Image: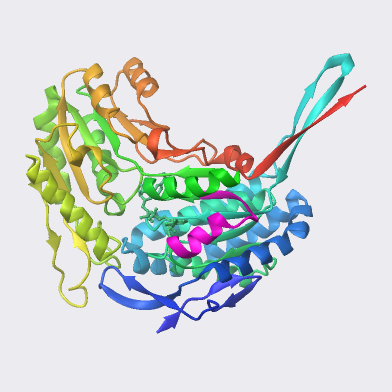
């Protein structure tokens, strides 16, 4: 069986103590490769390699660093289909989705930050005849990037690219649930001659390798995307050590449909927002609020569309929903469907595991599930399920829907469907979330700030926000 390796100091290496974890293929429910179960000794070696590489890497001009990052982007582009197959196999998502969204986005993340640093301007504050200030933005040193399993290479590269572009060296850990494309990225680094030690990839469990990275005294900043509880744990370790911290955490996003919306568009986009990537996107609109005047009409049209979502093995051309990521996760989602029924919900569609014929008989496939009849404040409507499950809730007024939408501990994203411009912008202003889409969903402009409020996180990624996070501002004041 294939054994993945860590990438430390420019070389592929086995974990120091020779231990491995099983890596499952969700669509078959079988182990297909082994992942290094790295510990603090591996993290130590990676941090050492990063610190050794830092003086030379940080001394490069932006244009030189840009060339190195573009080489990664170009090679991802050349290996796009292979990476998409690997992502689909490792995660369970449809190949077509990985090919059209995940891997192109990983390619674009490197290209975006490679070119952003060519357009940076520095800050200067004049004090008139007295003197002036200028601000140096200096890289931090070795930084940690820790990412989740739902958009593996997409989110991994979203952190690594700005960290490297701004002159840091990186110790990165992909999720142990989906390590494969990060491993392919280490091969790509070797293929394009990426400088040794600048990027180090350590595989393993969060509580072991991840925590060792967070605790390490020579890791100056941590960029983390994952669950809210994990974020809280990381913050409790990093805060007393005064590390810079960026936390992108969970969500329970409202999708608000007003009765004056462009109906067909709202139905179509809401279906995608609910079930793309099997509902395993932090931005998915899992709570659909529909104004009473069109509740029944919307429900019928939405269910009609959901019935057309084909659950099938991820490599099939017609697969619209693949497998969820793991058996544990499948069971968690099923337990929430049971809870929804206990809380008085009615399942309008789905609710079950889908049994596929061999060779996918043990795969983790779930039906897209639509539930109505729940109160806005029950657990099903408050807790993150992170699977193909949505609830439909009617509302009367703008005031009422804002109260319900804002009632969770989360505040990541929100979608609003209305043709009334004033209302759209009023609700956008009053909703508690870091991201709002009006009449659309998951349209991403990489220059914009990305992140959540409340328990959805601290800090912003994207554009110059990310480049600022990975640098320390130093003001230099000169008095004439
Ligand atoms: P998770 O928190 O279990 O794991 C995320 C990463 O953290 C993994 O690499 C894991 O190994 C590591 N980790 C776990 N414990 C750690 C510790 N003690 N120290 C250091 N690292 C540790 O999350 P997950 O299940 O992989 O991902 C799903 C979650 O991610 C959902 O809550 C989802 O909403 C969230 N998410 C958020 C965003 C966003 O941008 N806000 C994007 C995608 C996913």
Whether residue 79 is visible to the viewer of this picture, yes or no, is: no
Name which residue lies at 18% across and 77% down: 358
Residue pushed farthest front? 240
**Residue 399 image offset from top left, x and y in percent:** 25, 17
Confirm whether the magenta stretch covers residue 211.
Answer: yes
Name which residue lies at 51% across and 38% down: 460
Whether residue 479 is visible to the viewer of this picture, yes or no, is: yes
Residue 408 vertical position relative to residue 386 in the rendered view, above or below: above
**Residue 350 image offset from top left, x and y in percent:** 11, 52
Instruction: Locate residue 13 relative to residue 390 in the image: left or right.
Output: right
For the C terminus, give its image quadrant. Answer: top right
Residue 307 vertical position relative to residue 202 in the rendered view, above or below: above
Residue range in magenta is: 206-223
Is the image coloured rainbow, by chain, by secondary structure, or in one colour? Answer: rainbow
Residue 437 vertical position relative to residue 173 in the rendered view, above or below: above
Confirm whether the magenta stretch covers residue 62.
Answer: no
Q: Nearer the viewer, residue 306 or 52?
A: 52
Instruction: Locate residue 85 relative to residue 332 in the image: left or right.
Output: right
Instruction: Locate residue 28 relative to residue 170 in the image: left or right.
Output: left
**Residue 119 image offset from top left, x and y in percent:** 69, 40
**Residue 152 image offset from top left, x and y in percent:** 43, 59
Q: Nearer the viewer, residue 8 or 26?
A: 8
- Where residue 393 sits, quadrant-wise, is top left
Q: Nearer the viewer, residue 443 or 91?
A: 91
Name which residue lies at 36% across and 34% down: 411
Residue pushed farthest bottom? 1
- Where residue 148 sits, quadrant-wise, is bottom left
Instruction: Locate residue 110 relative to residue 136 in the image: left or right.
Output: left
Q: How many marks?
A: 0
For the N terminus, give its image quadrant. Answer: bottom left
Residue pushed farthest right? 480
């Amino acid at each position: 069986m294939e054994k993945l390796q860590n990438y430390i100091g420019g070389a592929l290496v086995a974990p120091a103590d020779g231990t491995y974890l099983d890596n499952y293929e969700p669509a078959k429910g079988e182990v297909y490769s082994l992942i290094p179960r790295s510990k603090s000794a591996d993290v130590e070696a990676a941090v050492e390699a990063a610190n050794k590489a830092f003086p030379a890497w940080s001394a490069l001009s932006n244009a030189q660093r840009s060339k190195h990052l573009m080489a990664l982007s170009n090679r991802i582009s050349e290996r796009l289909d292979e990476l998409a197959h690997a992502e689909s196999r490792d995660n369970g998502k449809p190949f077509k989705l990985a090919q059209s969204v995940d891997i192109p986005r990983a390619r674009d993340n490197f290209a975006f930050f490679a070119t952003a640093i060519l357009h940076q301007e520095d800050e200067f504050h004049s004090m008139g005849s007295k003197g002036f200030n200028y601000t140096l933005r200096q890289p931090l040193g070795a930084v940690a990037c820790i990412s989740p399993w739902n958009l593996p290479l997409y989110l991994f590269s979203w952190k690594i690219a700005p960290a490297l572009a701004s002159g840091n060296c990186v110790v990165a850990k992909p999720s142990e649930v989906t390590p494969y494309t990060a491993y392919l990225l280490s091969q790509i680094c070797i293929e394009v001659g990426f400088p040794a030690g600048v990027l180090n990839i350590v595989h393993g469990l969060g509580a072991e390798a991840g925590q060792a990275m967070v605790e390490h005294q020579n890791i100056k900043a941590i960029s983390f995307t994952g669950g809210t509880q994990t974020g809280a744990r990381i913050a409790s370790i990093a805060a007393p050590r005064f590390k810079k911290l960026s936390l992108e955490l969970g969500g329970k996003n409202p999708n608000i449909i007003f009765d004056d919306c462009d109906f067909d568009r709202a139905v179509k986009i809401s279906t995608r927002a609910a079930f793309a990537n099997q509902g395993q996107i932090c931005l998915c609109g899992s709570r659909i609020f529909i104004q009473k005047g069109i509740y029944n009409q919307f429900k019928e049209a939405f269910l009609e569309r959901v019935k057309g979502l084909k659950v099938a093995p991820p490599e099939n051309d017609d697969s619209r929903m693949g497998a969820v990521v793991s058996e544990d996760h499948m069971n968690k989602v099923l337990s929430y469907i049971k809870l929804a029924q206990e809380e008085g919900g009615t399942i309008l569609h789905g609710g079950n595991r889908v049994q596929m014929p061999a060779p996918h008989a043990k795969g983790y496939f779930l039906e897209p599930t639509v539930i109505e009849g729940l109160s806005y404040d029950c657990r099903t409507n408050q807790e993150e399920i992170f699977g193909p499950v949505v609830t439909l809730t009617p509302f009367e007024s703008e005031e009422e829907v804002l109260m319900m939408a804002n009632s969770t501990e989360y505040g990541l994203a929100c979608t609003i469907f209305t043709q009334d411009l004033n209302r759209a912008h009023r609700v956008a202003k009053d909703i508690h979330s870091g991201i709002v889409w009006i009449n659309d969903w998951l349209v991403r402009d990489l220059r914009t700030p990305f992140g959540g409020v409340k328990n959805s996180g601290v800090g912003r990624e994207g554009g110059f926000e990310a480049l600022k996070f990975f640098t320390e501002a130093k003001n230099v004041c000169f008095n004439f």
